[in-house]
Amino acid sequence: MSTNRAAIVTGGAQGIGRATAHRLAAQSVAICLVDREEAQLEATAGELEAKGAHVEKVVADVTVKSDVENMASTCLSAFGRIDVLANIAGGAGGRHLHQIDEIEDDDWELVVNLNLKSTFMGCRAVVPAMRDQQYGRIVNMSSSIAHGRTGPVGTAGARLVYAAAKSGILGLTAQLAKDVGAFGITVNAVLPWLTFGDQGSRIRSKFEALDAETRDRILSNAPLGRAAEADEVAAAIAFLASEDASYISGQGLPVDGAYR
Ligand SMILES: NC(=O)c1ccc[n+]([C@@H]2O[C@H](COP(=O)([O-])OP(=O)(O)OC[C@H]3O[C@@H](n4cnc5c(N)ncnc54)[C@H](O)[C@@H]3O)[C@@H](O)[C@H]2O)c1
């Protein structure tokens, strides 16, 4: 099937990825929905299809090169194009680590691979098709934590490693934008602060599991007095993926309610 615009959304089963898939699908963009959690992927794909979206599901681990390459070739064979890559899958790891000497090499590799290497591999997999089309929009997922953060670790697991990886994504974004601009490809990143998906989604649940004092301390630092909803971040991603952002490239857009 050939369609007007097609987007790959990684981490699309829940949270910000799910909200982004809904936003883009509402603009009649065909969605290649990518996640490693098959049951949730099926559920989100079902929601999108119920709204009339064209969806291709890809069960993939974004840290595995062959999976990432398969996601790009699946999008191309299903829709004939890759207009947008929303490189959203990522996370800070399950271990709650504060000081540098608590961090094992395995923690470093897990979080750097999940965020920075996966972002690199996703970009590498889609650029050839975008170059052939002379058109592409890549949106990478950084975080306000790229600038470092004081206070409790909160929901950010291996915070130091996570900050390093999310900061690396900004460098990758800035350089890749310069390397591929001549092919009509823009590359940007978003830097959200604390963002909640639907009830039961991972970060919302992690936050709710913190003690009340820690929760209050975290939210008291938010100028808007609350965390973001996933759709508020998805709106920024959809903008950077749109025609309206045609001359914006190499940027990191804070979506942090003036938190920084
Ligand atoms: N939620 C926040 O507070 C926040 C803030 C700043 C940045 N971010 C970043 O935004 C992105 C999405 O965050 P979220 O809160 O929506 O997360 P989430 O945990 O709610 O959703 C992440 C999705 O990615 C999938 N995923 C995780 N690892 C994967 C892998 N290796 N391969 C394929 N799929 C994988 C998960 O199954 C899940 O569906 C992440 O990169 C995160 O680091 C989140």
Image (cartoon, grey):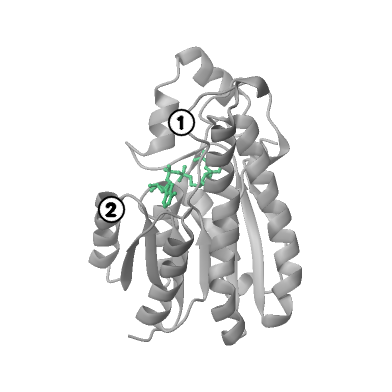
Identify the secondary structure beneath mark 2.
Answer: helix
Q: Residue at x 58, y 78 (%)?
A: 128
User: In the image, residue 3 lies at what x, y percent?
Assistant: 39, 84
User: In the image, residue 72 lies at what x, y percent?
Assistant: 46, 71
User: In the image, residue 124 lies at what x, y percent?
Assistant: 59, 68
Q: Which residue is drawn at 42% across and 62% down?
A: 67
User: In the image, residue 223 lies at what x, y percent?
Assistant: 64, 32
Q: Is residue 23 visible in the rendered structure shown here? A: no
Q: Mark 1 points at which residue?
A: 94
Taking depth in this image into account, of 22 and 65 the one nearest to the observer is 65
Relative height, residue 245 to residue 218 (above, below): below
Q: Mark 2 points at which residue?
A: 38
Question: Left or right: where does residue 200 sit relative to residue 253?
Answer: left
Question: Left or right: where does residue 7 sit relative to residue 97?
Answer: left
Q: Residue at x 54, y 54 (%)?
A: 118
Q: In which quarter of the image is the C terminus?
A: top right
Question: Left or right: where does residue 108 sit relative to residue 94?
Answer: right
* Disc sitting over residue 21 in the figure: none
Taking depth in this image into account, of 12 and 212 the one nearest to the observer is 12
Callout 1 crowding tier (Cα within 10 Å): few <14, some 14–19, many ≥20: few
Q: In which quarter of the image is residue 121?
A: bottom right
> Is the CB of the residue bearing disc 1 within 8 angstroms of ligand 1?
no
The amino acid at mark 1 is Gly
Question: Which numbered disc, 2 or 1, marks the residue that appears first in the sequence?
Answer: 2
Q: Quadrant of residue 28?
A: bottom left
In 3D space, how far apart are the residues under numbered discs 2 and 1 (Cα atoms)? 20 Å
Identify the secondary structure beneath mark 1.
Answer: loop
Relative height, residue 56 to residue 139 (above, below): below
Q: Is residue 41 visible in the rendered structure shown here? A: yes
Q: Quadrant of residue 129?
A: bottom right
The amino acid at mark 2 is Glu
